[in-house]
Image (cartoon, helix red, strand yellow):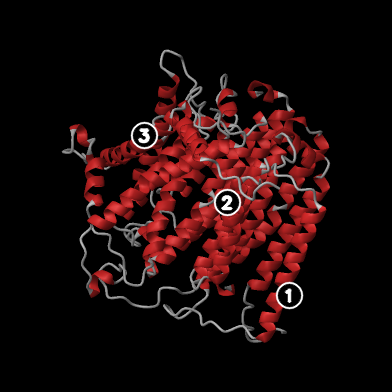
Amino acid sequence: MNGLIAIPTLQELLNYIVGILTSRTFLEMIIFPGFLNIMLGAAFLVWLERKLIARVQLRIGPLYAGMWGILQPVADGVKLLFKEMIFPELADKKVLILGALALMMLAVAPVVPIPFGEGFVIADMNIGLLYVFAVISLFPTVILLIGWGSNSKYSLLGGLRSMFQQVAYEVPMWLSVLGIVMLTGTLNLTEIVKAQQKVWFIVPEVLGFAVFFTAILAELERIPFDLPEAETELVMGWMTELSGVAFMVGFLAMYTKVYVMSALMTALFLGGWSGPSVIPQPVWFLAKTFLVASVMVIIRGTFPRVRVDILLKAAWGRLLLLALANVFVTAGLIWLGLGGIWKV
Amino acid sequence: MPDPIFLVLSAVVVVSAIAALEARELIYGAVGLAFSLIGVAGIFLLLGEEYLAMFQIAVYVGAVVVLIMFTIMLVRRDSGRPAEEEEPGRLGRAGAFVAGLIALAIAAAMYLVIPYSAEMPILSEISLHDLGRTLASGYALALVILGLLIGATAVGALTLAKIEPEEERGGAA
Amino acid sequence: MAFDVWSLVVIFEFLAFLVTFPLLVFGWLMGAKGRNAIRDGPFESGQPRMGEARQRYMMQYYPYLIMFVAFDIISMFLFTWGLAFSVLPFTDNLLFIVFLIVLVAPLGYALHLSGRRELW
């Protein structure tokens, strides 16, 4: 036995770090489809949501910050950056701040295996789909922590409701994608996108898409499932006691989630980056992603909120059975021999 | 020379577990547990078992820790006061000492018996496809029994947890 | 340099930390400071604080949580099945499908239990 620990020499460590910084993967991580992409996408979604909602409600929306109010999210961010972070006396400051940090880190994580174009993926994971679901399943923990750490009735209640909601809709989400896994036999998102070159998965998996879209709406806590937020009742639900920068981080994390989940939906059901090659692939991908996000935004302006017991009963009773039905339909499709179109 | 990443992950697992046990607030204990389980998932990744690692995170940290946190939150305690600590008695200390001795003995036995290699073994290069095939065909019956057992356990837990409604007028006990 | 997929995940998360943490520190340092009784209380839309925060809510939905733990594990196994579906013989697939149908029974029981609030 030579030594107990192999501490890498400083030279090796520097070489490794330099190797990382100069590799293409690192550039992908920072610019596209990495951080710059996510931050710009999330900020753009903030503006898009406010503008579209305004149009649905016959208003104008952000107008003064830049042309068409496009700089509104920037203005909001700068404002929040300088606000005081007020924490109640009985709240646990560490938990709240670290919780906001964890929210952002978790919201960003699912982007890693999502392919924004052929070759535009941060890490081509063989279990990409499962990795995304594992990250999503970590959210209730953080939400419970923030809700509890606020030590306020409304925050705690919002956190519990949110946990129940997210946990209830996770199972239909997984089962609705099972059909795609059965058709392609892989969990690799790049392979799944490539398998859709002829026909997008939304065609055989219509039911799966409907279930998945609904489940994602609930996971993102968007109307009609925004009971944890319930602006007229719980203020901001479990995010109530986050203020200042912590709120900005939580708010941004929320929209980052919308962006990343829309991207996931595009990759899974809408053919990812496929489209006539007059337009480059990443543009197709982004266009479809923002289309999905816009539908989510318009739904926000259209539907009333669902009551909590109906919400949970619908998830466990109806949505889960629909997802199972989708699995059976897909099984039938494969047995009839129609699965060959999507064979990878 | 063992892999430094393995040592870091093992440290995370052990230190988080100890922190979980020693924490004053129960919630911090649950957080420590979550970190410990994520460390275990990391060790699975080192062994090349990606599927198992994702399974671990989704099931343990995603479901079991949430269940534990929910239970902790519903235990009513006077706010602000940390739980009082007792000094472990003589029996407690003797027990801890014996447990430590046994742990050392097991570690020594393993070191002497198992050939030591610094390489992290990749246990198997099973593709996910083969894993699915083996699990579903060779072990299908075991899987189904497992699933039914889980379902039965859930039903049992619910039956035990619920409060029996008070008997109204008439009706046998 | 070729990178192992998981070290990329770690690096990416580390970058996320590097981006977010300075924001939080900046906000912590830059924000005004002022403590008084009103600011320090939890937010209840202006009303003075009433009641204990940590109480026994939502116990009614406990069955859903238990069923989630069960379905979480089962879903993971279902993913392995889904991966191998197209190459498995018909009888094995049928076994799984029957299994899925049988699982609806405990689910129905959990649904029934959560509908009755007096039990919790």
* Residue A324 vs residue A161, the one in the foreground: A161
Dot 2 crowding, Cα within 10 Å, few <14, some 14–19, many 20+:
few
Residue A257 or residue C62, whichever sits in front:
A257
Q: In the image, are marks 1 and 3 on the same chain? A: no
Q: Label 3: state its secondary structure.
A: helix
| Distance from Cα at disc 3 to Cα at disc 2 | 31 Å
The percent position of residue A316, horizontal first and vertical second, equals 58, 54
Q: Amino acid at mark 3?
A: Leu
Q: Is residue A320 above or below residue A112?
A: below
Q: Residues within 10 Å of mark 1 (few under 14, many from 20)?
A: few
Q: Answer left or right for B124 relative to C39.
A: right
Residue position for label 3: A36
Instruction: Tell me if I can see residue C113 in this picture.
Output: yes
The residue positioned 63% from the left and 45% from the top of the image is B3
- Marker count (numbered): 3
Q: Are marks 2 and 1 on the same chain?
A: yes
To which chain does the residue with label 3 belong? A
Amino acid marked by disc 1:
Val
CB within 8 Å, label 2 to label 1 = no
Of tags 3 and 2, the one toward the viewer is: 2
The furthest residue to the left: A64
Q: Nearer the viewer, residue A67 or A301?
A: A67
Q: Position of residue A85 (x, y in %)?
A: 28, 60
Circle 2 sits in a helix, a strand or a loop, which is it? Answer: helix
Q: Position of residue A139 (x, y in %)?
A: 49, 52
Residue that protrudes farthest toward the top in the picture: A278
Quadrant for residue A176, please give it.
top right
Residue type at mark 2 is Val
- For label 1, the residue is B98
> Which residue carries the number 2 mark?
B8
Disc on the earlier residue, 2 or 1: 2
